[in-house]
Amino acid sequence: MSSRFGQNSWYIILILVWALALASDSEASQQLKEHMLPAAATAKMVGRLPAAKRLRLTIGLPLRNQAELATLLQDLYDPGSPAFRRFLTPQDFAARFGPGMESYESVAEFFKASGFTIVATHPNRVLLDVEAPAGDIERTLHLTLREYQHPQEARTFFAPDSEPRIDLDVPILRISGLDNYIVPHPASLHPEPIREGPGPVPKAGSGPNGTYMGKDFRAAYAPGVALSGAGQYVGLLQFDGYYPNDINVYASRAGLTNVPLINVLLDGFDGSPGQGNVEVALDIEVCMAMAPGLAGIIVYEGLSGNDILNRMATDNLAKQLSASWTYPTDATTQTIFQQMAAQGQSYFNASGDNGAYTGVVSTPADSL
């Protein structure tokens, strides 16, 4: 009788241990949201992403003390508040609101143990850049990466067929890089061709056919303004390189003084000019024309929008930041913009022909 009771007791103990193990696994597993693309639901699937294809992912971690941050941001911009314009340094922001170091290290260790390579860390601990073959990514995140025919462009794109699930108890906000539906490209306007005869014809500028160049921009948009940007820096977000000689030639022909250019290369990008180099040059040239007294133009060149934005925030060298590109944004982008706001930085993004943006930050969507 006693031996039978003892044997049953061992069964009960094993069942309890197994149940506790399942409960532990459940607690350590988190289901992420908003990674599946609506376009993938209707696009034609053409296959599965090759398992050996290496992808670079950006892991976004949520900020701490978010209620306190929301109050701070309101006070920083309230002229009646004692905190008005008492902006934080990047170090202060990371200490008060950035993810904890222990959490950050745990995330890095998890991905290393899962076969990923850590390719970049960030001082505010908001982002962690990792790289791995698609097969390891699928296994670690419990999803499948499939390829689809792009509905508007002559190419395929890849995207997950389900939301990521990660067996980690440290909260993850967003994983960028699981799809390439939107490829960064200039948010270009589509101007009407110059024509003679009835209708508006540009004749005010000093460029060919009366178009604007150089000092014409200041004369049109800031007439009589003496401010020149003296002593300040402007930061430009770019997904391509540029030819320095193009800038020199433009400055000479437009009668402008060359402003010092500072290149910051990210994500392994080497700065080589590609098809988008004209957009980069235009951004630089307009800055030189509108603010000829700038101490420098910092050209941030990379492959990931969040990586570039985060470097702009953690550098905190330029208070005026700008981009004229369409690129993917997500919940992590919003946290980076919050850090910029806490530090007194202003970010401006071209909308192309789409008009102004209001409300929650969204992806410039001329390709959607």
Image (tube, rainbow, N blue to C red):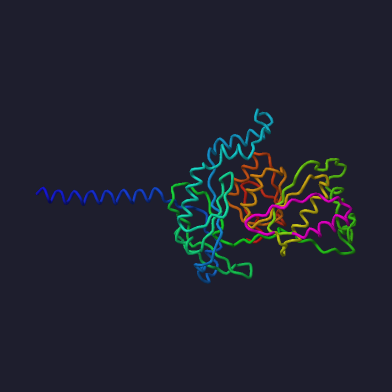
Where residue 256 appears, as percent x and y from the top left, is: 87, 51
239 horizontally vs 335: left or right = right
Where residue 264 appears, as percent x and y from the top left, is: 69, 52
Residue at 80% from the left image edge and 43% from the top image edge: 229
106 horizontally vs 24: left or right = right
Screen quadrant of the C terminus: bottom right
Residue at 51% from the left image edge and 69% from the top image edge: 50
Residue closest to the eye, 351 or 230:
230
Magenta stretch contains residue 360: no
| Rendered view: 72 above or below 178 | above
| Rendered view: 263 above or below 314 | below
Residue lying farthest to the left in this orientation: 1
Residue at 65% from the left image edge and 43% from the top image edge: 340
Magenta stretch contains residue 261: yes
| Rendered view: 62 above or below 254 | above
Over which residues does the magenta segment extend?
A: 242-270
Residue closest to the eye, 7 or 329:
7
Q: How many marks?
A: 0
152 horizontally vs 173: left or right = right
Rendering quarter of residue 354: bottom right
Residue closest to the eye, 97 or 54:
54
Where residue 81 appears, as percent x and y from the top left, is: 65, 29
